[in-house]
Image (cartoon, rainbow, N blue to C red):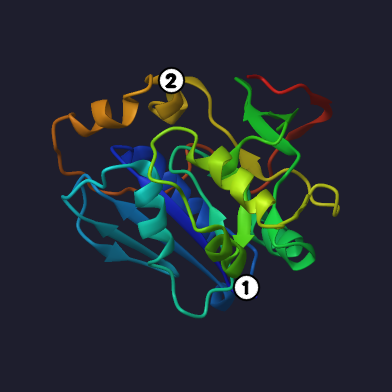
């Protein structure tokens, strides 16, 4: 099965460099994976590397939902599944392999655990409670059957979840299949900003920021090839 990690980005050059590094370190076969990144701040030169491609345009999409649909439409024709990758988060080396295992069982991968990084570099396991869209993946036909994302800026993920459920798209949990958690949701300053914390008009406020040009530097802030995941499961943090 070929899977595409799909990423929408906006004014997060440092975090985006870390995300690309996450993709390069994936243990899923190279010929069966790709990363597509869509930037609508016109911040970068269009560029590509080993299995990844960044498209940067100056015209902002009216809503995040429409931008997510546009990014999903950019993947190669032979892609079977789409993984949601958020530009401010990190994905451990088995992320795509775990997502493929889950969507091989059911059309939708919805992990029950997420990781939060601690000050000492360790990773604590927390319940997702059905949230944390940045760890989801779908078979492409299931995503299309549900109609993609609605043209809204907040809640487009939960709206899609509702419509996928109504369309009879069931989910599998890669954690229940034996995989360790792979999605590191970054809190605080490490993320740069969280759209959900910017209020009902956060997407528009971001769009009003001054345009700038940036150069990507690909790399991790620290080595995640041997992550230290702390035993024990904690409640969702929000």
Residue with the most extreme front position: 166
Is residue 207 found left or right of 157 in the rendered image?
left
Q: Position of residue 156 (x, y in %)?
A: 48, 40
Vertical comparison of 194 with 59: above or below: above
Give the structural element (helix, strand or loop) at label 2: helix
Mark 1 or 2: the one toward you: 2
Q: Mark 2 points at which residue?
A: 197
Residue 124 location in percent, x, y?
Answer: 72, 27
From the viewer's perspective, tell me whether residue 175 is left or right of residue 87.
right
Q: How far apart are marks 1 and 2 (CA)?
A: 37 Å
Vertical relation: 216 (above or below) 130: below
Quadrant in which the N terminus appears: bottom right
* Residue 29 numbered tag: 1
Q: Which quadrant holds residue 107?
A: bottom right
Residue 103 is situated, as x and y percent measured from the top left of the image, at 71, 63
Question: Taking 111 as reference, is 46 left or right?
Answer: left
Q: Nearer the viewer, residue 20 or 32?
A: 32
């Amino acid at each position: 099965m070929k899977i595409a990690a799909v990423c929408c980005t906006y004014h997060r050059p440092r975090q985006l460099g870390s995300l690309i590094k996450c993709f390069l370190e994936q243990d899923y076969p190279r010929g069966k994976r790709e990363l597509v990144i869509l930037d609508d701040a016109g911040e970068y030169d269009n560029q590509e590397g080993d299995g990844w491609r960044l498209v940067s345009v100056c015209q902002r999409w009216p809503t995040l939902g429409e931008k997510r649909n546009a990014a999903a439409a950019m993947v190669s024709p032979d892609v079977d599944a789409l993984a949601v990758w958020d530009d401010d988060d990190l994905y451990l080396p088995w992320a795509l392999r775990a997502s493929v295992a889950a969507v091989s069982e059911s059309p939708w991968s919805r992990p029950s655990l997420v990781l939060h990084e601690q000050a000492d570099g360790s990773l604590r396991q927390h319940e997702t409670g059905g949230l944390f869209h940045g760890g989801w993946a779908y078979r492409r036909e299931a995503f299309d059957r549900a109609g993609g994302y609605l043209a809204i800026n907040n809640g487009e993920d939960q709206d899609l979840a509702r419509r996928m459920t109504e369309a009879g798209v069931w989910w599998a949990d890669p954690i229940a299949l034996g995989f360790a958690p792979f999605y590191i949701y970054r809190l605080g300053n490490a993320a740069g900003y969280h759209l959900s914390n910017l209020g009902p008009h956060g997407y528009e406020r971001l769009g009003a920021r001054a345009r700038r040009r940036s150069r990507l530097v690909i790399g991790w802030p620290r080595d995640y090839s041997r992550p230290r995941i702390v035993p024990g499961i904690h409640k969702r943090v929000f």
